[in-house]
Image (cartoon, rainbow, N blue to C red):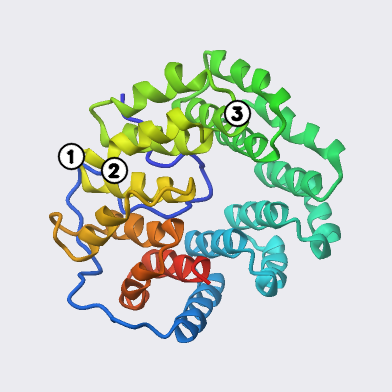
Amino acid sequence: MRYLTMLIAFILIFPMAGCLDEEQSPSYSPSHVTQRPDMIKMHDTALNIVKEGLKDSNGLIQTHAIEVVATCKRLELMPYITEKLRSGSVPVRFAAATAIGDVRYTPSEFAVKQLLNDEDHNVRIAAAYALAKLGKIETSDVVRKGLESNDQTVRANAAMLLGKLGSYRDVELLKGVLRKEDSTDKVKLQSVESMAMLGDRSVFRDKLWPLLISKYADDRLMGIFGMSALGTRDAKNAILSMLHDDVAEVRLAAAGELGKLGDRSGKPEVESYLQNKSGGVTEQGNQFAAVAIGQIKDRSLAKYLPELMRSTSKPLRLSAAKSALLLE
C-alpha cells in the first residue's frame, strides 16, 4: 500500500512535485553558484519572496509562505498572517491560525478567538490550538475532540496539532485513533508522527522502522520524518543509515532531518546534489536540498541559495528563502 507523501492534509511544509516514481521536470539546474554571497542582500531577497508568497493568488503558495514565517519566527511579518485569518480559503485560515500558535503571537489572540466559531471544523481546531499555545489551555480539549470526527482530514489535523501541543497524556488518545477501523492511512501516519513528537519510544520499532525498510520511497520518507520527530539516539542512527538510500530525494530528506537534530553528516550529500554530481535533478530533490541548507545550518552551503531563489518554481523559491532566513 502506498502512503501519502505528506502527512498534513492542508499544510505542505515543502510542497512536492509528485511521488518519487514519476518523471519530473526540474525548474533549477545548478549551472553556477555564487562563491561569496552577500548575506544581507540574500536576506532581503528572501523576505521579499516570502512577502510575495503571502500575496499569491494560489492558496497553497500562501500556506507555504505562512509556514516559512512561523518556522523562521519573523515577527515583523505576523501582522500579515493575522490578516489571513479572514481569508476565504479554509487551508489559508487553518495555516494562519496554526502559525499564530506556533509563534505564540499574542497580538492576534482576539482575532484567532473569533475562529472558534468558524464554519469549518479544521479551522476551529486550529484556532483552539493557537489559543492553547497562548495560554488558554482549556481550548486544547477542542483539538482532542477533533480526533472523534468522522471527517478524516479533521481527524488527521487534530492528531497533528496534538503532537505540537506537547502533552504526553495525549499519546493514549492517539493510540486509540490507530485502533479505529475507519482511520485512513493519512490519519494513522499523522498519529504515529505525533506520538513520536510526544516522546513515545514504542513507535520506533513498531511503526517507524517498518516504514524505513519499505520498498516504497514515499514510505521511507515518512519513516525519516517520524524518526526525526522522535529524536532519540536510536532514531538519529536510523536516519543516518538512510544517507545510503538508492533514491536521492530520500538521502536529501535524511540529510535535512539530521541537520535539525544537530548532525551535519548529510552535508556532503546536499552539496553533491546541488553540484549535480548525484544523478538527475528533480523538482522534489531541489526542494529537499533547499530546505536542508537551512536545517544543516552550515553557511558554506549558502552559496547555492541565490540561484535557488531565482527559480521559476514558487515553492522552491520559498524553500530557499526559508533556508536563507534560518542561516541568519
Label 3 vs label 2, nearer the camera: 3
Q: Which mark is residue 260?
A: none
The numbered dot on residue 250 is 2
Q: Residue at x 30, y 54 (%)?
A: 284
> Callout 3: few (<14), some (14-19), or many (20+) C-alpha neighbours within 10 Å?
some
Q: Relative to residue 267, is residue 92 drawn left or right?
A: right
- Binning the other alpha carbons within 10 Å of mark 1 as few (below 14), some (14 to 19) or many (20 upward) gives few
Give the mark count: 3
Identify the element where label 1 is drawn. Answer: loop
Percent across and percent down for residue 17 are 31, 54
- Gap in Å between the C-alphas at discs 1 and 2? 8 Å
Mark 1 touches mark 2? (CB < 8 Å) = yes
Badge 3 is on which residue? 199
Mark 1 or mark 3, which is nearer the start of the sequence? 3
Viewer-proximal residue, 97 or 325? 325
* Residue that appears at 27% across and 45% down: 251
Question: Which mark, by number, is residue 246?
Answer: 1
Q: Is residue 218 visible?
A: no
In the shown orientation, is residue 23 left or right of residue 72? left
